[in-house]
Amino acid sequence: MKKLRVLCMVLRKTRAGEILLGFVGFLFLVALVLWAVEPGIETYREAVWYCCALVFTTGFGDVVAVTFVGRVCSILISCYSLFAVAVVTGVVVAYFNETVHRQYDQARLQFLDRLERLPELSPEELEELSRQAKQLR
């Protein structure tokens, strides 16, 4: 649950959710334009397929844009997809960095807490604390 909260915080801070939602909306809008202007695209489903193929593989070649508007739309959706992939990658990296940082802080606080209670610790706990201190070097 804590990891989900961290991910939501990172998404909120970076506004990546809005960017991805805008990208999906743009993809469906471009598919609508392509359906209207491209003679080789006969259904809206084919237009969405073409856009997804552009996003994930830069096209399979089964459908090709032949009109100027179709080619411009293809370029725009390809460039926007590069941006969206970069944002997603950045958010994932930020999420993992934040998670590791929080785990490190928590471990450090536990270690310091045990140091503060040094006189109260048993010999086994002192041995464990000594082992942990050696690992930090």
Image (cartoon, rainbow, N blue to C red):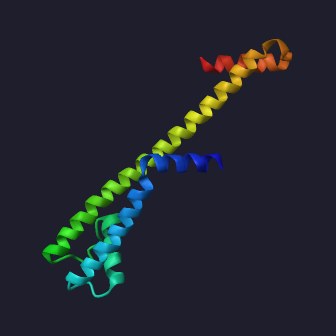
Q: Residue at x 28, y 88 (%)?
A: 42
Q: Residue at x 64, y 25 (%)?
A: 108
Q: Residue furthest top?
A: 119
Q: From this view, report whether residue 113 is shown above or below residue 27.
A: above
Image x and y of residue 14, in percent? 43, 47
Which corner quadrant of the image does residue 79 belong to?
bottom left
Give the number of marks. 0
Q: Residue furthest bottom?
A: 42
Q: Residue at x 49, y 46 (%)?
A: 10
Q: Residue at x 35, y 76 (%)?
A: 49
The quadrant of the rendering that contains the C terminus is top right
Q: Horizontally, is 70 left or right of 47 in the view?
A: left
Which corner quadrant of the image does residue 27 belong to?
bottom left
Image x and y of residue 85, in percent? 37, 55
Image x and y of residue 55, in percent? 33, 65
Q: From this view, report whether residue 76 is shown above or below residue 129.
A: below
Q: Residue furthest left?
A: 68
Which corner quadrant of the image does residue 114 belong to?
top right
Image x and y of residue 60, in percent? 30, 72
Q: Horizontally, is 104 left or right of 119 in the view?
A: left
